[in-house]
Image (cartoon, rainbow, N blue to C red):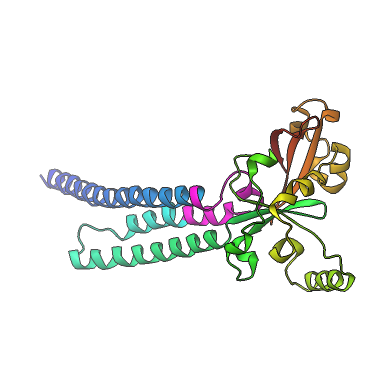
Amino acid sequence: MRGFLSLLQSVGRVIEAMRVMSFRVICAGAHLAASALLIGTVVLLLSLFGGYEWPLWYIQGSERIFGLLIFVDLCLGPLITLIVSDAKKPVRSLRRDWSIVAAIQVAALCYGSISLWQGRPVALVAAVDRLEVVSASQYSGLTEDSLKGKCAEAAKLKLAPGLRVCWAAARIPKDREKGQALLFSSLSGGPDLAELPEHYVSADEVLAEYHSLLKTVEQAEKLAPFLRNNKKIQSFGALADIRLIWIQGKERAAAIVVSKEDSAYLGIVTE
């Protein structure tokens, strides 16, 4: 008889544990679903309005912040909810715990979203021998209105038509003293040439500046080592029939591949 009662008690404890765990799983699952919806909305908005298109987000190294957002909101948040959710707790305690978790998660989401918005790619600027990706935060407090009249239409350039950024070009000042001052400022941590809209040419002159960046595969390999023996480049056809434009991002580099004959866009390769 005692053995039977002991068995019943064990079964009861198992059922109770399953009930508690079921409550935890339901709460964590609901948290996960809400987080996924929220993160998906943020990523979609940044993709549509923040300039985070391939390969700009990749060469800027933005996947680190995206990864942090996903870890905190899709992994850490629901996991903490799974731990703190206990059916035996008073409703008031549960609400307090959930509120704390939600507050931390929202704070992390806001921080990540603001960082991504400030670091969004705004312009691709032809400078010296390359295209440089310039983010909103690199314009040193200037508004994007300063780019008006200096952005060429992507359709006219025939370069990476899917990239919705300002296509601009910067020239080194002809005045020797100004050029040296710009160089010394850049070397001492100041803004580079590509970050100074006052040195941008007008939109009508951008196409000529971009054409000056076109390099043969051999020439481009000397500027960007990642292009050496790049198999993807070879897939675009004979190397003699293509030209490359080197793009330098914050973390990585890429290259736009165009046709030698008419400069038509063929694709993009990344390191």
Q: Residue at x 44, y 60 (%)?
A: 109
Residue 90 visible in the displayed image = no
The number of callouts visible is: 0
Of helix, strand and loop, which mostly describes the magenta segment? Answer: helix
Q: Residue at x 78, y 69 (%)?
A: 186
Most foreground residue, 41 or 196: 196
Tell me which corner region of the image, top left, top right, bottom left or bottom right, holds residue 142: bottom right
Answer with left or right where residue 237 lies relative to residue 150. Answer: right
Image x and y of residue 140, in percent: 64, 70
Most foreground residue, 161 or 1: 161
Tell me which corner region of the image, top left, top right, bottom left or bottom right, holds residue 189: bottom right
Q: Residue at x 74, y 72 (%)?
A: 190
Magenta-drawn stretch contains 62: yes
Magenta range is 48-71
Most foreground residue, 267 or 40: 267
Assign the C terminus to one quadrant of the image. Answer: top right
Magenta-drawn stretch contains 222: no
Q: Is residue 200 above or below residue 129?
A: below
Q: Is residue 69 above or below residue 268?
A: below
Image x and y of residue 83, in percent: 34, 58
Image x and y of residue 6, in percent: 16, 48
- Residue pushed farthest left? 1
Q: Is residue 239 above or below residue 130?
A: above
Most foreground residue, 152 or 76: 152
Answer with left or right where residue 174 lies relative to residue 120. Answer: right
Image x and y of residue 73, in percent: 42, 55
- Residue pushed farthest top? 237
Tell me which corner region of the image, top left, top right, bottom left or bottom right, holds residue 116: bottom right
Assign the N terminus to one quadrant of the image. Answer: top left
Residue 20 visible in the displayed image = yes
